[in-house]
Image (cartoon, rainbow, N blue to C red):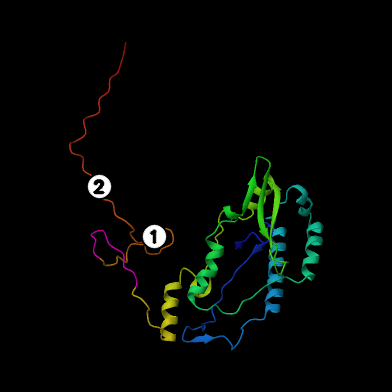
Amino acid sequence: MLHTWGSALTHHPHVHIIVPGGGLSADGSRWIVCKPGFFLSVRVLSRLFRRLFLEGLAALHAAGRLAFFGDLSALADDAAFAATLAPLRRCEWVVYAKRPFAGPKAVLAYLSRYTHRVAISNSRLVALDDARVTFKWKDYRIKEGNRLKTMTLDADEFIRRFLMHVLPSGFHRIRHYGLFASGVRASNIERVRALLAVAETAPPQQAETDDGVGSVDETRKCPCCGGRMIIIETFEGVRPSRPPSPFRFRIDTS
């Protein structure tokens, strides 16, 4: 899940899903290409996402896995929670699907704007003191002219909104599923390239072994994820010029 600041430092989450334009058949024997044109109905996707999201939210509440505090403490009651979700089942959810990217470089450029930046840059901060923070935001409702405006928030409210963009423990900004799931990614990519007859654009980068030879040690695996670990840098031990003097101590019994 990716969080962006939105127009005025709001806390609306954005979920970005990149889907390949095809996939492997169930038996892995052929590559199935999506239909010509756009492959997905935005309206169908919007309503499917709405149903799955609200069903998952209701299941978490029924299992007692949601906690509510402050003004939201009343939502711990089943009837109050159901009444809050009711209008969300009727309104239209905004699910925006873009047409295919123009190559891998465009994909990286697009993703980097969300995965490798902070919630708000220093250039948007205008003024701050012990009580308030003033920052710039862009009003996208204005179609022409200068869309930049300023907003001032109390310091605690600014920090609260900032922390909305800090992922909880156990969450990741990027997750890979399907073809690119960690456990089967290498074999799937190799299979897809063979089916599409795609040649390697560059030889795989080799990692240096302990002796400096350019061969790859396939047995070096990460104990956490099972992936191959690559040596980035090797440090040689420094021998002392003379052996260390023996440690001496004295016990004073006076």
Q: Main secondary structure of the magenta part?
A: loop
Within the magenta stretch, is there residue 165? no
Residue 159 position within the rendered picture, expressed as x and y whole percent measured from the top left: 65, 48
What residue appears at the point 67 percent right and 81 percent down from the top-left corner?
41
Q: Position of residue 42 (x, y in %)?
A: 68, 78
User: Residue 216, located in which quarter of the rendered image?
Assistant: bottom left
Considering depth in this image, is 251 or 114 the residue closer to the camera? Answer: 114
The answer to which image quadrant residue 231 occupies is bottom left
Of residues 201 and 254, the one nearer the viewer is: 201
Dot 2 surroundings within 10 Å: few (below 14), some, or many (20 or more)?
few
Disc 1 from disc 2: Cα separation: 24 Å
Image location (x, y in percent) of residue 192: 45, 81
In this rendering, is residue 171 above or below 158?
below
Whether pointer 1 and pointer 2 mark residues with C-beta atoms closer than 8 Å, the reply is no
Q: Residue at x 59, y 71 (%)?
A: 17
Q: Is residue 67 above or below residue 84?
A: above
Q: Which residue matches tag 2?
A: 237
Q: What is the three-letter code of the residue carrying label 1?
A: Cys
Residue extent of the magenta highlight: 204-213
Position of 247 compared to 129: left or right?
Answer: left
Residue type at mark 2: give it: Gly
Residue 140 appears left or right of 29: right
Coordinates of residue 92 in the picture (x, y in percent): 76, 72
Residue marked by disc 1: 222
Question: SS of the residue at dot 2?
Answer: loop
Foreground: 90 or 57?
A: 90
Going from N to C along the chain, the mark reached first, 1 or 2, is 1
Q: Is residue 209 magenta?
A: yes
Q: Secondary structure at mark 1?
A: loop
Q: Viewed as shown, does residue 4 lie left or right of 192?
A: right
